[in-house]
Image (spheres, rainbow, N blue to C red):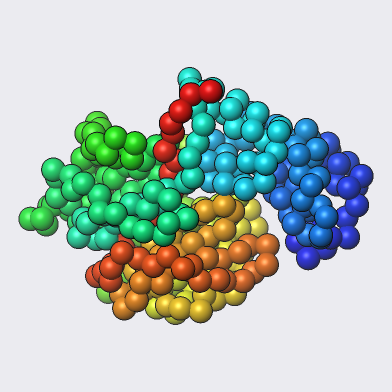
Amino acid sequence: METKEMHLLQEIDLIEVLEANASQEENFLFIQKWTRSADGRTNRFDDLMQYFSLSKCNKDFVWSTVLEEKQLKFSTRGKKLIQQFMQSYGSANLLKQPSLAVGDEDGEMWLCTDLNTLQWQPLQQPSFQIKYYSACASPGGFVVSGGRSQNGFNQRECYSYDAKNGQWNTLPPMPTARDNLFVLGGCNDEWVADVHEFDLTQQTWRQRFPMPDICKGGAAVCFNDHVYVVGGRNRSCMRFNPRTNTWPSLQRPPSRHNYGSSLVLNGNIVVFGDLNHESIEEYSLPTDSWSKWTLKMPQKSKGWAFASRHYIVEGCV
């Protein structure tokens, strides 16, 4: 059902949809959209949680969407779901507010541990030096891998950062060093809109429908089985549906985010920085609209390598 039609759905009809639908990720999103679609519905969130099973959700979806939902913190059933999820990792710890980490292509990194204070703190610099690396979130921190050394050599080393104690740890290296690989667009003498999909099972590539617009210096994120290409010089915002092989265009961000990084936060897409400004902008999927954060990037950069959202875990109950 389209978001704009959600307010027409009565609660009894929503419950029938939730009971008949096997995808718990979709059920959680249905509950989110329905409770936000009209006044007076947010107080129904707790009761509707009984029609949602956290254990049947993808772990990445839980971290990126479920645990970001503010209504969970005021929901009795929601708090129990959080505790059950943490216990599945061998811990009954509670979670603090999500933290953000960003890093530029030259290897400098910053951390914002409280989104209410809106302040960046420089991270302890790792002993290694790399450029143009990849990064992804992990519980309690993030992982960086690959990239190039200061001498220009490709690297296969991997390192993890623990945000709770501020320590860097060395992980087993990747089997082989990675060079530049463009799956969505990219530049090979000239910018292209090509899209290719790699099948991990068959170990084969296939070409998919190209992006409707070339995105120069943009970022890509995966959310709810779709791929979003955002930012860049042309203020892109496009969504790829792998099932239908289609690319509907969405509302463009107000600002350029040339070589800015991106991530999913609380069910929305956030784009960080640009070569010429420090703005952070957030895209709302339900309303197809953009808003600007008060928090700005810690500095201007030649290009942002990553943005990572994670939780710092502390305190037993």
Q: Residue at x 63, y 53 (%)?
A: 243
* Closer to the camera in the image, 243 or 51: 51
In the visual, does 262 lie left or right of 31? left
What is the count of numbered marks?
A: 0
x and y percentages locating residue 173 in the rendered image: 23, 35
Lateral position of residue 284 relative to residue 309, left or right: right
Q: Which quadrant of the structure image shows residue 102?
A: bottom left
Does residue 5 sit above or below 257 in this rendering?
Answer: above
Q: Residue furthest top?
A: 90
Q: Which residue does the image show at 81% across and 45% down from the upper left?
A: 44
Q: Is residue 52 left or right of residue 5?
A: left
Residue drawn at 20 percent across, 60 percent down? 106
**Residue 79, visible in the rendered structure:** yes
The correct choice, above or below, for 21 with respect to 317 in the image is below
Q: As drawn, which residue projects farthest toward the left?
A: 151
Point 25% across, 54% down: residue: 122
Residue 213 visible (yes or no): no
User: Residue 298's spot in the image, x, y percent?
Assistant: 31, 64
Q: Examine the rendered structure and indicate whether residue 225 appears above or below residue 187.
A: above
Image coordinates for residue 15, horizontal then vertical, percent: 86, 41
Residue 68 coordinates in the image, percent (x, y): 57, 46
Quadrant of the rendered image containing residue 212: bottom right
Question: Which quarter of the figure is the N terminus placed in?
Answer: bottom right
Tell me if residue 316 comes above or below residue 4 in the rendering: above
Residue 207 horizontal side relative to residue 111, left or right: right
